[in-house]
Image: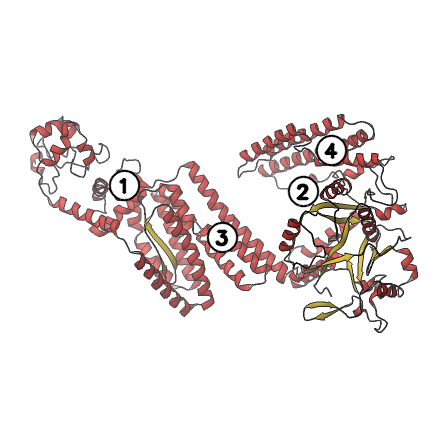
Amino acid sequence: MNRSNEIRPVLRPTIRLRSDAVSARTLPSTESSLGRDVSGSGISGYADVAPNGSGARIGNPIGESPILSARDARAGDGGAGDSFFEAGSVWTPEQGRKSELIAAVRAIENKSTGGFTKFIVLLVSLAVFVAAGVAWWDPWMVSMLVVVLLFHEAGHYVAMRMFGYRNVKMFFIPFLGAAVSGRHFNISGWKKAMVYLAGPVPGIIVSLPLMTAGIALEKDWMLELGGMALLLNTLNLLPIMPLDGGWIMHLTVFSRSPILEIVARVIGIVAMVAFSIFTESRFILFVAIPLVLSLPMTYRVAKLIRRLRDRPLPQPERDEIPDAAIHLLDNEIQATPLAPTPTANKAGIIVQMYESLIVRPPGIAATLAIWMVYGGAFVIAIVGGMGILVGRDLFRDGIFDMDMFDADSHSVPLDVDDTRFHLGTEPIVESYLAVARFDSAVDLEAAKQRLSPENLEKYTHVRFGNVWFASIPIEDDGQTEDELLVDEDVFLEDEFDDEFGEDDFEAVRERMRELFRPVDPAETWVAKLAQSPNVGDGMDDVAGDVEGDNGRMPRLGQSTVHVISGMHHSSIQIRAIAPDPETAKQVAEEYFQMPSVAGDRLYLPAWSPLDAPTQQQIDCRNVLKTLISGITPETAPELFEERKRLYEQQYATIDDDYDPVRAAEFAAQIRDLQTQFVADFVDGLDGEQATVGRMYQRYQQDELAYQADVEKRSIDIRARIAAGEELDESADSEMMEDEYPIMDDYLIGEQNLLGLSDSSRRSHHFAAHVSGDVLTAEDVMEEREYADQDADTDVIALNPGERILNLHVHRATDQAATLSAIVAFLGDRGFHTFELQYVTPTAEFE
């Protein structure tokens, strides 16, 4: 059989007829025109002709020759494009099929729903979803589902509208959830990723505070609603199609390979089937069946998209697929097993292919950024959810009880014009403060007669009108601080070792209650203070309180006695109105800004009536305070800017993979700046101040060396782990085998340059650490609003322009002596309208 007998009549010739003159202008050579289908749509394809009579197909495959659009033809030299369209053409069945295909694609593109219709669809689908849900689930659960799904889909809806999607509509799907659909042929990959993330991420962000509020306010509905929102949005981030997380991974990873895409879809189908079996939901199984049947077509389409990924494609015009692109994709489909697909289905495939080809996967930088948001949301959801649930167990049903932290605030006015002070004769190391309030000073003096004269002599007490302060010594069991720490470690090991059950939780809970339990006045030397002569010796009346409709109310004719202790031991504040703003600022800065201390040591304050520090000691304290504060814009502006630059450089180079070596390099540079600052500052000192500076310098050297050694050991341990070495529990102890330097140990000297208190002297009663700040009327109002207090809660009424000196008693050897000395000191400087503030628990600890 010769080759001429192989020629078959072609059914789809796509050569348009034209005049010779036009052909000569537009197609200058036979070689360049062969194989090019130049139509009004500008499609490049195969030309099914055999000009040499051989029957062979001559031409270039699609994509290997440039696409000539109608716009290009009209832009040709000498109006060649216009002459081209004036030429006649031959209609063929192929043209009719392509026209039908274009019409089907346009029907998909132009399919639009009016706003009212969209709203009706949403309402009807919501009604069907609720009806179906109530038939199978609890109505409360269905209502929570509706709220969570509406919020989730609203995120997708808003993002789509922001990025210019067309025909955006929301609807519910019975038993499955809800969805938002829209169309956009010209959107960047990162925007599409943001659309996917706009649903679960806001849901996670809102759910965590909602759950926390539910626990704090003890509102179960808030906890349940937040928990459902967190669960559904976190599950939606799983990298399984068709969840949002699956589409994010499809956009950034799976779409780059047909095999990856088909594997991802198979995993998604398997997950759906497993979920259907686990929940015994046949409806989900029915949804998975068509997905399984569509896998072959999905693979072919994905393979075709991957093949066309790097080929030129006409860009969308007016958010429509150009005719040229439709012809091009149709020609490619015709060469695959998808060719027999019905026109309507093929139009859907073309729309899918075109959108996938136009919306290219994000670049490396954008992909990493998307993964950071995606992974960060996932981690926050899991860690935050676990933390909240653990907190719920601890505070509601576990170790802690929420009411353990409930407390009442007290504001007590002090009559400084009617005072009587007694300094105890008993040496004291640390104390609690007892506060008793009576109807009058006469009642107070009468009640004191019931107390032991011996105790009244031993312990410090002071009266301010009808208010009485007394120091309650804290019992010393003889244990050192190290022994107490060992006991705590043993306790924690005993309670949390291995697995623990209900009994262990109860033991830990009781231990925590013991730590927070306030001291009962009945157990102190002021026990009889509140007893009325008409009341028996029962200890129930010691506090002078009874249960009433509005909580604890004072008993008529009785005092109110509190021992400020337990977790509220450090809540004591004393306030006074300053004579003028300048005096308030000067007193706060000069007398109540002492450098911090550690251990049992305390400074003798400048306001101590006994053994007050000298001016030289105060100057040495100021030197130490400057050294502890370190590099600031005021003390070392150049070093401050250099340190700021190093921190910015460090933060700019931080990535997810923590590098301890690089971090240690930055830390070493910061330590060099700190060392330089101290050295420069000490060089400018002389006399006793220089001695204090050198003491601190030695401490700094050892402290920074300790830090460097810990970093070095940490790097060594990480290297051993990276090398595959198995480390036992001793590895952690290796890092902490050296004792951490304590600053106070370096500042103790025979000269006592800082004026530290001597426990063998009576002046030790006044040793304390007190800090102060100045408050304006606006500050007081903000503080009152933050604490949700009524306007009459505070005794002090501050006028505009006045200032309050607010002092916090952090530690005090003798609480009553400290407060008395502060009141006397401030009174001599014109301060007035004194007020004591403290907090007591409202929980029952028995």
Residues under numbered marks 3 and 2 in contact, where contact means CB atoms less than 8 Å apart: no
- Quarter of the figure with the N terminus: top left
Q: Nearer the viewer, mark 4 or mark 1?
A: 1
Residue at point 44% right, 61% down?
Answer: 145
Residues under numbered marks 4 and 2 in contact, where contact means CB atoms less than 8 Å apart: no
Q: Position of residue 435 (x, y in %)?
A: 79, 59
First along the sequence among labels 3 and 2: 3
Residues under numbered marks 3 and 4 in contact, where contact means CB atoms less than 8 Å apart: no
What is the C-alpha distance between the residues marked 3 and 1?
Answer: 36 Å
Q: Position of residue 272 (x, y in %)?
A: 40, 57
First along the sequence among labels 4 and 2: 4
Other-residue count near label 1 (Cα within 10 Å), few / some / many at <14 / 14–19 / ≥20 = some
Question: Which numbered disc covers residue 700?
Answer: 4
> In the image, what residue type sits under mark 1?
Pro
- Residue holding disc 3: 204
What is the C-alpha distance between the residues marked 4 and 2?
Answer: 24 Å
> In the image, what residue type sits under mark 2?
Asp
Residue at point 64% right, 42% down?
Answer: 727
**Helix, strand or loop for disc 2:** helix
What is the C-alpha distance between the residues marked 3 and 2?
Answer: 36 Å
> In the image, what residue type sits under mark 3?
Ile
- Residue holding disc 2: 732
First along the sequence among labels 3 and 4: 3
What is the C-alpha distance between the residues marked 4 and 1?
Answer: 68 Å
Q: Is residue 240 visible?
A: no
